[in-house]
Image (tube, helix red, strand yellow):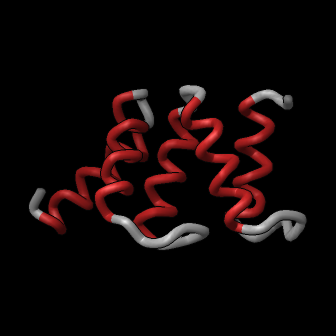
Amino acid sequence: MPPVDQIREDAKKVYWGSSKSKSMEDAFKSFEKCANLGDAESARYLGIMYLRGKGISKNVDEALKWLEVAAKRGDGLAEKNLLSLRKIMKK
């Protein structure tokens, strides 16, 4: 199995449209695998994908969950996204 960093970077290429070799659903699964292995950045991407319904059905509760996981793991962007989202939702 490739290292977590490699899997995440490949998934990011699909997410941002610079790779057509895999689907958005494949990217989601890759981020999920990495997040479950402790990768904070992948957890943030999962949160954003759930929030936008990109590669998976929209689910705000799951978005909040994954952004919280990423923030707890030290991802500063996830923390900022979480704060903004909570202000909007008043949660």
Considering the image in quadrants, where does the C terminus appear?
A: bottom left
Residue 29, given in percent of the width and then of the height, sits at 66, 51
The quarter of the picture where residue 1 lies is: top right
Label count reads 0
- The correct choice, above or below, for 42 with respect to 2 in the image is below
Q: Residue furthest left?
A: 90
Q: Is residue 40 left or right of residue 64?
A: right
- The correct choice, above or below, for 52 with respect to 85 in the image is below
Residue 26, given in percent of the width and then of the height, sits at 73, 59
Identify the residue at horizontal 54%, vertical 52% (top origin): 45
Residue 74, given in percent of the width and then of the height, sits at 41, 28
Residue 25, given in percent of the width and then of the height, sits at 68, 64
Q: Residue furthest right?
A: 21
Q: Is residue 34 left or right of residue 71?
A: right
Identify the residue at horizontal 69%, vertical 47% (top origin): 30
The quarter of the picture where residue 85 lies is: bottom left
- The correct choice, above or below, for 59 with respect to 2 in the image is below
Identify the residue at horizontal 54%, vertical 67% (top origin): 56
The quarter of the picture where residue 54 lies is: bottom right
Looking at the picture, tell me which residue is in the foreground, 57 or 6: 57
